Image (spheres, grey):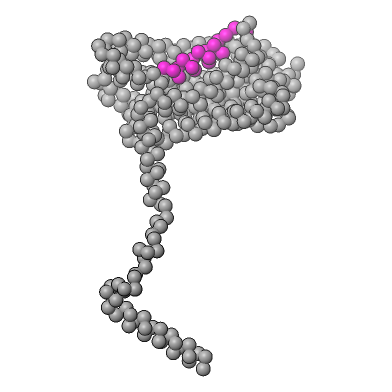
Amino acid sequence: MENQTSASEFVLLGLTSDPHLQSFLFFVFSVIYFITLFGNMVIMIVISTDTHLHSPMYFFLFHLALTDICYATTIVPYMLVNFLVKQKTIEFSTCIIQMSLILLSAGSEIFMLSAMAYDRYVAICKPLHYQEVMNRLVCSQLVGGAWAMGVLHSIINTLPMLNVQFCKYTEIKHFSCELPPLLAAACGGTFLNKLVLLSSAAIFGSSSFLLTLISYIYIISTVLKIQSAKGRHKAFSTCSSHLIIVVLLYATALFQYTKPSSVSSFVLDQLFSIQYSILTPMLNPIIYSLKNNDVKTALGRMLGKIQVSQSVFLPLHIPSSVCTVPPTTSNILHPQLGSFQGATTKLAEEIQGQLSA
């Protein structure tokens, strides 16, 4: 066994070794990555440009879209490259950087969802105090705290990995340098790293989950007190998109990071990782676009502005008949036009005669 300084690079086994299947998967994940980038960038542009969406809820949604872009970009591009090359290697330093960015994005996302849950709690349970409680400073602190927790989560798990021993030839049974499969590929003892991973996942995951859960307990209890069915539907519709995303992310991510090794399997690990790290960032903007009327209306306004701007810059086609002055009306428009044209013609003939002489 050689220490981690001898392991200058790792081999990522990826999803499959079949060349034909790799070509198909390259196309599939290219489409998924394009939809992820396009959808989240559209959400960010709409929120930035539409003044109707300059509210705390969409401020958090803007940063959630940014987090999703970071999450997907950390994983998918390198994954696509590996579909096309034979040597599926990754340098040790690059692998550690990718791992730390995955931890940062995942940690930031779960706390961003908690901040969004708190925002919905204040909006539904304390609507009269919403503007006072969710002011710009509080929103900035919540977003900054979410990013800070992501950074802390990354540092706590990355620093112990620098001391892990790897063999000279190390295969990672995964498509990215995610922490659990990276620990499984280590040659030396990883008890401390697994303890740190389990503790951080339990502390960070459970704290953000409890914040979200408590917020929704109060939200549901308040919604159930509303007398009219229309009022209940309207109140709950404001947080239905967020609730779907929370379930999609927590159900797979928490299981992946806290499951015992006895239930671990190569295919199951890959599917869960694809769900919360690749599919969820793609689905977030789609869910918010389909389930949120304000976003759909803002998208319609943006598309309308684009169509108007295009029509303004289109070339103006004026019929020739409009520009041509009829002979019968030329003297009416300018009484001396006919004599002027005759004098011009005569002068041109005289100049031509002098030149020929």
Farthest residue, direction top: 262
Find residue 238 and report its image quarter: top left
Q: Is residue 18 left or right of residue 60?
A: right
The spot of residue 232 in percent (x, y) is 30, 15
The spot of residue 118 in percent (x, y) is 36, 18
In the picture, which quadrant includes the N terminus? top right
Name the residue located 59 percent from the left edge and 17 percent from the top edge. 271
Name the residue located 36 percent from the left edge and 85 percent from the top edge. 343
Q: Is residue 85 visible?
A: yes
Relative to 318, residue 244 above or below: above
The spot of residue 108 in percent (x, y) is 47, 23
Q: Is residue 96 left or right of residue 20?
A: left
Could you say which is closer to the camera, residue 170 or residue 318? Answer: 318
Q: Which residues are magenta?
A: 243-261
Task: Tell whether position 329 is magenta.
Answer: no
Main secondary structure found in the magenta portion: helix
Name the residue located 42 percent from the left edge and 30 percent from the top edge. 62
